[in-house]
Amino acid sequence: MIQWFKDVWEGFWTVLVGMKITWRHLFTQKVTLQYPEEKWQLPPKSRMRLFMKYEDCIGCGQCARACPVQCIYIKADKRDPKATPIFAANGQPIKLDVTVFDIDMSLCCYCNLCTYPCPTDCIYMTPEYEFATTDLTNHLYHFAKTGAKFLTVNPKAPAKPAAPPAGAAPAAPATPKPAPPTPAPPNGGTPPAPAGA
Amino acid sequence: MDLFFRLFPEAWPDWLRVALSAAIPAVLLLTFMAVGPIVYVYAERKIAGFMQDRLGPTRVGPYGLLQTVADAIKLMFKEAIYPTGVDKKLFLIAPCLVVLGAFLAMVVIPFGGKAQVADLNVGLFYVIAVSSLSTVGLIMAGWASNNKYALFGAMRSAAQIVSYEIPAVMILLGIVMIVGSLSLQDIVLYQEGGLTHWLLFRYFPIMPIAFVIFFTAGLAECNRTPFDIPEAESELVAGFHTEYSGFFFAMFFMAEYTEMFVISSVASVLFLGGYWSPLPNHILQHIGPIGLGPLWLIAKAWFLVFVMMWLRWTLPRLRVDQLMYVAWKVLLPISMVLVVLVGGLLMIPATRNGFPWDRWVGWIFTLVIFGALIAWMAGARLSKKRRVQDLAA
């Protein structure tokens, strides 16, 4: 009998305890993020849409080889050796004309493996995640630009003219390397327009 | 009804005056009942959201205010689907009957002064009888749906409502003994004169317990969580309204929320002084010639509806055996003891009008409740600050 009263009281009391908890939650800070208005700021190294800086690409195709799902398509022709020499931002001479550089983001598995072998750090992942479209072919990004402005002056001091101070040569490659996973891509964070479409 | 009857000139034929005076409250109540769920569903979703640290509906209209309007429009225009093998007549009658059961009980609720559709001298019995009508509707819906889950839900609902009506009626018996009348108007008039006269604060330890029991039983009668095994979505798809769609589904919804309001308003009529303001000497009972009675009743009823929603988002669903345990082994014995106690106390002249400490209890009780509320709110603010600090750290 006493146990029955205890049980009844406990039942009633625990209801009140539960109500207290929910009452407190009525007034707590809400965690909802109202998506289109407020956006979650992703960390700068998050792996979202791939971006390729065409002006720095030397057309080596290592990214395409590293890709486990074969979503990168590269076509490159030999560049006319008599033309003005052009360079990537870290001083690598560009000896190939990259005519096609397509990335199919609908195939991409966001593994980030393509960015490691890139000798010029021109392919990297951006924190940009809003690229839903109504047409799947819009996920095939064409990065090859016809009117790209290449560096014709090597930003890295060439080794031969600067030969006299012997210690300068090993220090040189480390200088102008751009940090690959910068939060804002070089073209101002705007989605790279599918150029060939 | 009398209120409206006198509005029309006496030169008019009697049948016209009766018809008009019956039609006006009917239309008013029907509007109140049809528009009410829009408010309740919005409130429910907002409260649910807030209690789960979400925002609830925010998209349609400012603060999502038009969300339920949009839902209602959507439900009205949806196709009503009759699955194979349904008993079409019963299938159509069932939601109407459920709505009718919830609607008819509103007839006797006194909204203030003479603003009552019908002051039946058997008001409480009428409420009990009519609210059982929805059980018939639920069983019809379950049976006609040709769906085992619907039938399970209907059977559970019937078992539950039959069980929980007994403690509720026992509590009503105590109140009827105290007041000496079954009419809801008389019960409200008995509680005139402010907070200390409310039946909740009579016979101090007895009536609060009675209120809790009546409210629990009422909660079970509206099939609300924690007593919503008739539509337990994790066991029976949606219970008795599994096969319903479109407007008929909306009618079940309407009935559920109207029943919530009816139970809450009956509870506030019985225990919380109905349309009387909590202050003595009719303070805040009128502003000039305008009576605030309906506002007080609706405020009290909506507070209880809020408590129902609060409970819904606090407690998990009971198992069937636990449900029956609560009804038959907890609520019923306590309510029977209360009936005997109240009856005995009424026999003694000294306690015929309540215990001597009753007039002091009401205020203290209210103060304690409000103090607890303020403390909780302060605690909530503190915890919010702590939370913000935790997030910042």
Image: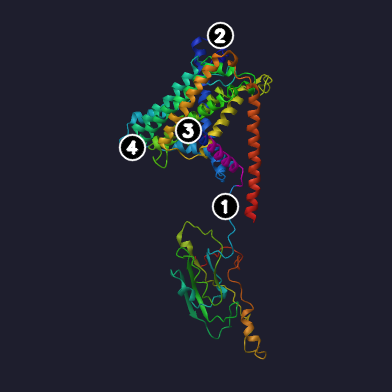
The residue under label 1 is A36
Q: Residue at x 43, y 36 (%)?
A: B322
The amino acid on which the numbered mark 2 sits, given as a three-letter code, is Glu
Residues at marks 3 and 2 on the same chain: no
Gap in Å between the C-alphas at discs 3 and 2? 64 Å
Whichever of callouts 4 and 2 sits on the residue coming sooner in the sequence is 2
Estimate how packed mark 1 is, as few (under 14), some (14 to 19) or many (20 or more) residues with alpha carbons within 10 Å: few
Q: Chain of mark 1?
A: A
Q: How is the model colour-coded? A: rainbow
Res. B148 mark: 4
Whether residue B244 is visible here, answered yes or no, is no
> Height in image: B323 above or below A126?
above
Residues at marks 4 and 1 on the same chain: no
Q: Chain of mark 4?
A: B
Residues at marks 1 and 3 on the same chain: yes
> What residue occupies the far left of the structure in this picture?
B85
The amino acid on which the numbered mark 4 sits, given as a three-letter code, is Lys
In front here: B251 or A53? B251
The secondary structure type at the circle numbered 1 is: loop
The residue under label 2 is B10
Gap in Å between the C-alphas at discs 2 and 1? 63 Å
> Height in image: A141 above or below B330?
below
Left or right: A151 with respect to A76? Answer: right
The amino acid on which the numbered mark 3 sits, given as a three-letter code, is Trp
Gap in Å between the C-alphas at discs 4 and 1? 43 Å
